[in-house]
Amino acid sequence: MTIAAIATPPGRGAIAIVRVSGPQAGAIAMRITRIPAPLRPRRAYTVDIYDAGGALLDRGVALFFAAPKSYTGEDVLELHVHGSPVVARCVLEAAVDAGASPAAPGEFSRRAYCNGNIALSAAAAIADPIGAETRAAARAAAANLAGGLVAEIERLRNIVRGVLEELAGAIDFPDEVPEPERRALDATMASVEADLHALRQAGEIGRVVREGVSVAIVGPPNAGKSSLLNALLHEERAIVSEMPGTTRDTIEEAVVVNGVPVRLIDTAGIRAHADTLETAGIERTIDALSRARIALVTLDGSRPLGPAERDVLARTQGRERVVFCNKSDLGTVGARALAECEPIVGSAFDPSTQASIRNAIARVGWNGETIDFSRPHLATAAEMMAATEALAALACARATLASGEPVDLCAGDLQQAVAALGHVRGEAVAEEVIDGVFARFCIGK
C-alpha cells in the first residue's frame, strides 16, 4: 500500500512538504504533475501539480527517492509546495485521489524500521528531537538517533557472547580448550553489569530531560510563593498582593534549570479559615501537590511558625521537597526553628537565593548530577525492562559462580542475557511494543 501525508507542522510557512511512500509513488508523481517521463532519483524537478479534475493547485519542487535508498526503504516522493495549509491539504488530497492512502501516525518511520533501515531504539529516538523543549533534550535525542545506544548494546552483547563461546569450547573440546577461570568470568560479568546499570541511570536522567520535572510551590498565604515564581521566571507572571488568598488557582509555567525543563506550579496558599472560592483553590493546590515530583515549600521565615506553616510541613513530610524560608531581610525567627529541615534562607528577590533554589531543585530532582547529554541512554519502558531482564540474568550467572557450581551452568543465564539485550536493540520485539513506540509519532513522520 502507498501512503501519503503532510510532513511539515500545521500553520503557515515558506514551504510545506507532502510525502508519499510505497510502490505507487512514482506513478502518483506522474499522475498529479502530468510529467511525460518518470522522475529520476535524487534530482529536483520544478513541476505543476494538478488535482483530479485537472485544476492547477500549485507550482513546486518534486524529489523522488527509489527503493531501497530512501528513508522508508520504499519508493518515496516528496512534493515541496508553498507553505499555505490549504495548498498542502489540496496537494495531499490530489495524491490520495491518485492512489495513495492517508498515513497513520509514525507510519513512515515504522516502514523504515520494518525494512531494516533503522533500529527500534533509533526509531524511538526520532520523536524526541521533535518534542525537544531545550537544547539538552535535543542533544540527548541526537545521541540515540545517531545509533550510540545500538553500538553500546552490541558491544555488551559481544562480550557476553565471547564468554558463551569460551564455555562452549571448554564443553565441546575439554582436552584442547581449558575451562574459563572462574574469577575472570565473574569480573567480565561484573563489568557488563556496571555498564548496564550506567545505561539505566542515564535512561532515568534521559526521561527527566524529555519529560521535565514538576515542582509545586506550596505554603501558607503571603509567604511569597507568587513572588518566587515571578523571580524564577524573570517576569511578572503571577499577581502579587499583601492580601491573603490573592492566588485562587494554580499557575503553571516552564523554566530551564541546568539544561532540564522544570514546570513550576504556583498554588493557592493553604490555611484553615478560607472562604468558599479560596477553599476551591486550596483543593487544587492539594491536587497539584500530589501530582508534582517536588514540593517547593515556601514559608515566611521572618516570623514564628504557626499552624498553617506546620500543616504544610506535615503534608510534605517524607516526600521530595525543598524548604525555602523567605523574607530573611525582615528576620529569621521561623527559619531558625527549622534548622533540622536544612532550609534555604533568603529572599525571593535575591539572585543568590534564586540560584540556591535552582541548585536544590537539581539536587532533589536528578541528584544534582552533571548530565552528559551526548551519552546514549535507554529511552523507552521496553528498553528499560529488557535491560532489567539482562541484569537479572547476569546476577543469576554470577550467583552460580559464587556458589561453586560447575562453570558451564552459567550458560543458560548468559544466553538469556544475550536475548534480553537483543530486545533492547529491537530484535524479536512484540507487536504491542512496536505499536507503543510509533504511537508517539506525528502524522507524516
Image (cartoon, rainbow, N blue to C red):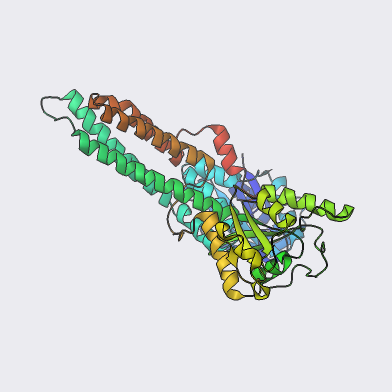
Residue 219 visible? The answer is yes
Residue 64, quarter of the rendered image: bottom right
Q: Is residue 314 left or right of residue 258?
A: right
- In the rendered image, the vertical position of residue 113 relative to residue 285, given as above or below: above
Residue at 23% in and 29% down: 167
Q: Position of residue 20 (x, y in %)?
A: 62, 49
Q: Position of residue 227 (x, y in %)?
A: 71, 69
Q: Nearer the viewer, residue 50 or 302?
A: 302
- In the rendered image, the vertical position of residue 404 relative to residue 298, given as above or below: above
Q: Nearer the viewer, residue 207 or 264?
A: 264
Q: Position of residue 310 (x, y in %)?
A: 69, 54
Q: Is residue 22 left or right of residue 68?
A: right
Quarter of the picture containing the N terminus is: top right
Residue 302, quarter of the rendered image: bottom right
Residue 421, quarter of the rendered image: top left
Q: Nearer the viewer, residue 373 or 220?
A: 220
Q: Nearer the viewer, residue 339 or 254?
A: 339
